[in-house]
Image (cartoon, rainbow, N blue to C red):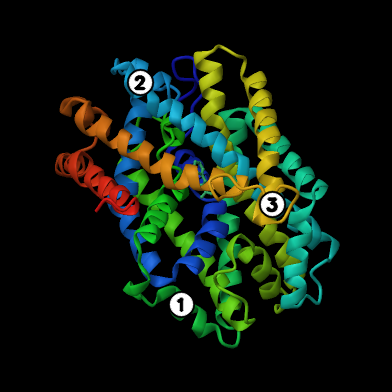
Amino acid sequence: MGDLRGRENFSSGLAVFFATLGSALGLGNIWKFPYLTGESGGGAFLLVYLLSVVFIGIPVMICEFYIGRKTRKNAVGAFNKLKANPAWKIIGYMGIISAYFIMFFYSCVAGWVYCYMFKALKGDFVSITPRSAEIQFSSAVVGPWVPLFWQFVVLTVVAIILICGIRKGIERVTKTLLPVLFVLIIICDIRAVTLPGAQAGLNFLFNIDFARLSPGVILTALGLAFFKLSLGMGTMITYASYFTDDNNLILTPVKVAASDTIVSMLAGIAIFPAVFSFGLEPGAGPGLLFMTIPLVFSQIPLGSVLLIAFFFLTSIAATTAMLSLVEVPVAFFSEEKKIPRTLSVVFNCLFIMVIGALATLSADGAGLLGKVLIFGKTFFDLFDFTSSNILLPLGGLLIALFVGHQVRKEDFRAELSNYGRLRMDGAIGFIRFVIRWVTPILLVVVFLNSIGLI
Ligand code: PHE
């Protein structure tokens, strides 16, 4: 299959899988998942997270795939094409805002990862101790010039790949590098679980203590499911608009969600045993990854080489996720506003750099703007909280309501069965029921619960 109705698309089912997984896998798995699990109490948080993936994440991903592939349009244009009431376009506009909010802080953390790769190359982590790990982290974060410089590098790399386009850019990068990331995390895991005292870390991750669950924790787990699977903001609508016609829109989400969850667990298994073994604090927050991984690798023969590889691959994961984030506004501006793609990429990346500097300068409460609080949060936390805990779940709710209650049953069946080529009648009926009732009701309950109404 070549260009589709004048638009580029992915070349095969495998390419679709890797690109989608490339969007899902990222700092969400390797950085956010472990530190939120650490802050929110381990196993019980993990359980709520898994339930959110099954009953909310996968159904919302199917809805986004439906909208994207059926229309082959960007997140706003899709609703025009479906001849929906114009009010539904709010989903697309909210998605663009979410993409910016996430990119503001995501590009900052990706900058730390790039910076760590560089430090590892320079040999900064040889003979590292738990104390010096903390100092290294603060030096990478406080800046102001070092983190700003790396954020700029990150955005430049993203811009170059996006300018290369869908197949030569996104597809080629994701297909080559994701399998290597997987292998490296497993090496890291083997070392981590054989550290002295590793068992305490595994217990922390897998023991379920319901007393630690609170409405806030449940909302955070739900928000994390959206964030990690890149849902609720039109990324998957946009990506699905480049899918092949024969892609299975039910199995792909299941495979992507399963692989994404496995990588998160592997990241947790790499980090928590080390946290306990080195006497670090599991609730250390955003610095957790950056303090533990250099310590784990310092205990392995060839550790310094593996450490470089680890941060290199984490930067790949972060970069492929960013491609999908920036693609949302890029596709919108180039298709709806007819701005040439290259210009749209450059303009969006510059905008993200300028506002994203606010996140970078306030991260970890440390930098120049670390003490400036809006609604009690730093810029960094505000961008993160508003997108993950409010905009994405809200977007997900609207998407499920739209597909569940506005799209005709026959249209839904036809698209999901690839116009009769797949025999999945029973499964499609069940999924439609979940999308119409289970997913929206669960989302509303979690929301109302978290703001104290029930
Ligand atoms: N899923 C990505 C991650 O885990 C982040 C992301 C969120 C990407 C939303 C696209 C949209 O890092």
Total numbered labels placed on residues in the image:
3
In front: 218, or 348?
218
Disc 3 residue type (three-letter): Gly
Q: Position of residue 126 (x, y in %)?
A: 81, 73
Q: Quadrant of residue 194?
A: bottom right
Query: What's the mark number on residue 204?
Result: 1
Mark 3 within 8 Å of ligand 1, using the beta carbon: no
Q: Position of residue 1 (x, y in %)?
A: 45, 25
In the rendered view, would you say 435 is above or below 199? above
Disc 1 residue type (three-letter): Phe
Q: Which residue is mark 3?
A: 370
Residue at (57% x, 25% y) in the render: 330
Disc 2, SS? helix
Disc 3, SS? loop
Query: What's the mark number on residue 347?
Result: none
Disc 1, SS? helix
Disc 2 residue type (three-letter): Phe
Question: In the rendered structure, which disc, 3 or 2, sits on the residue that comes first in sequence?
Answer: 2
State the separation of the CA atoms marked 2 and 1. 45 Å
Q: Which residue is mark 2?
A: 79
State the separation of the CA atoms marked 3 and 2. 40 Å
